[in-house]
Image (spheres, rainbow, N blue to C red):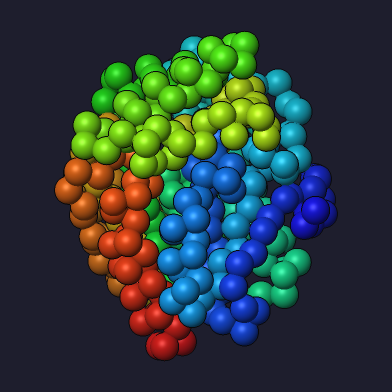
Amino acid sequence: MPTLRTPLGDVYFEQRGSRADPPVLLVHGVGCQLIHWPDSFLNGIVDSGLRVIYFDNRDCGLSFDFGATPPTIEQLIEARENPTLLSPPYSLSDMAMDAVHLLNHVGQSGAHVVGVSMGGMIAQRLLANHPERVFSLTSIMSTTGNPDVGAPQPEAIAALASNFIEMEREAAIENGRNVNNLLGGPHYKSTEVGMGRFVELAYDRALRPAALLRQFAAIVTDGDRRDVIRGSQTPVLAIHGTDDPLVAHDGSVDLVETVDNGSLKLFDKMGHDLSEPLIPAMVKATVAHVLAADANR
């Protein structure tokens, strides 16, 4: 089993593509395991002459369980209004350091980083704390931590919070499918063409509701990242859907307006999901961004 030993525990990862090709590091969102990357997305990048490195974040999938007592939902709600009220078990910067350990383990000085949702936030911390390791950044359906942008719809927050509750297998799978269908938006059914297809597989591989609470604690206490990425010359592409109920697309607008070398790609009918009908265009935009940045390095 391909794992690396970090100071805190083992991180599970996989790779596709030739080691001679430019590396693309993929960082996923809250509670998402590496199996939530659709094959069409992975193979689309690899078939374009790139190599993908992707992994289970700490507290997720087959990577190490942090084990600390998670915050309550009530504490997370309070911390959204005042982050100083909560001391998280770990931070997004800690999660970014896991990515650095992975790059070291596979012998890469850096990579083109692609982050989805929370993964985009981790990627911003990677850019801020370890800028030399980020050749380019592609942020998908994420935001800057600016409290004035990226606001979720109340029903999306309520749906996501239901994933924090311990349930029996069948109830948890049904709830997970319902949550994914809501977050995926009204145009593409997630359980048919999005990440909702992987709910049962993810449950049986490694479902950890307590870890979701710890990862959300890292998000809500991370604060506004604009000051630490402002003026960055690293090429940044922000991809977002105009029908995202969890992270409003002005979060991506804010990102490209904060850095010095940002571009924005908005997709109609895209919710908070990786939907098959949109993946070819997402891959095309991502690959073009990576290849342009690699050519200029």
Q: Residue at x 64, y 22 (%)?
A: 210
Most foreground residue, 187 or 263: 187
Residue 99 placement: quadrant = bottom right
Image coords of residue 229 (percent x, y): 41, 60
Image coords of residue 211 (percent x, y): 63, 29
Residue 148 placement: quadrant = top left
Image coords of residue 237 (percent x, y): 33, 64
Image coords of residue 268 (percent x, y): 17, 48
Q: Residue at x 44, y 25 (%)?
A: 177
Task: Examine the rendered structure and indicate whether residue 276 appears above or below residue 293.
Answer: above
Picture mark count: 0
Residue 187 seen anywhere in this rendered image of the structure = yes
Q: Is residue 154 left or right of residue 22?
A: left
Q: Residue at x 63, y 53 (%)?
A: 55
Residue 215 seen anywhere in this rendered image of the structure = no
Task: Examine the rendered structure and indicate whether residue 152 appears above or below residue 281.
Answer: above
Task: Examine the rendered structure and indicate whether residue 107 appears above or below residue 243.
Answer: below
Q: Is residue 39 left or right of residue 260?
A: right
Q: Residue at x 44, y 58 (%)?
A: 40
